[in-house]
Amino acid sequence: MLEMRVTGLGLDAASKTPVVYLRQVDGEARLSILVGAMEALSISLMLNGEQLPRPLTHDLLLMCLKAMGARLGGVEICDMRDGLYLAALNLRLADKAIRLDCRPSDAVALALRAQAPIFVRSSLLTQGREDAAQTGAAATTPRESAQRPDAASDMARQAEARRKADVLNGMLLRGRDLPHADPDVERRYRELLRVLEPVTSQKM
């Protein structure tokens, strides 16, 4: 098993499906995995340091594990069957080791939240390259940084901005004045409006 880290998200040129990029921690091995849109959003939020007011599914699952006294020791992308990657969660509960089958996208999203290591079976790195060559998948350069906003984190920011805009609209409907006299508050309102119409150079 090789320890990997997430280097970013992209979009597969052929299928227009989100891709998560992984790279070996102490080496050059790489792996790209197609993931669903919601899982890409969940991963992107962690890569970009975004926080939502309410927990998403992966946040909730990690909260449940902690409430039960369990700890995520690490995740593994361990096999491929019928063109699909398989993964596993390695949990510790008291003195018991528990291994759970899961999707790689869920494993990555949970590992990022728990700051747990991500391992990939070395044989999959070669196998993944062979499958890509056979299917004619377009080569995509893995992103080395996910700090710039992408389409998924834009979605999260827009949702939060609209929530705030609804609060302001409710204040107006109730006849309350907005604190526009304060320059700092006015600046925040202008930033809020800008978030509602984001322009990003890096798309998921």
Image (cartoon, grey):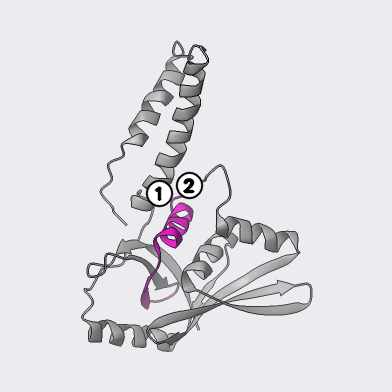
Q: Is residue 62 above or below residue 177?
A: below
- Judged left or right of residue 1, residue 30 is left
Q: Which residue is mark 2?
A: 50
Identified at 45% across, 10% down, the residue is: 181
Q: Which residue is mark 1?
A: 153
Q: Residue 71 placed where, x, y %?
A: 68, 67
Q: Is residue 104 above or below residue 155?
A: below
Q: Nearer the viewer, residue 11 or 22?
A: 11
Identified at 33% across, 32% down, the residue is: 194
Amino acid, disc 1: Ser
Q: Nearer the viewer, residue 38 or 195?
A: 38
* Secondary structure under the numbered disc 2 in the rendered image: loop
* Secondary structure under the numbered disc 1 in the rendered image: helix
Which residues are the magenta region? 25-51
Identified at 38% across, 56% down, the residue is: 146
Amino acid, disc 2: Glu
* Residue that sits furthest to the right in the current view: 94
Q: Residue 101 placed where, x, y %?
A: 57, 79
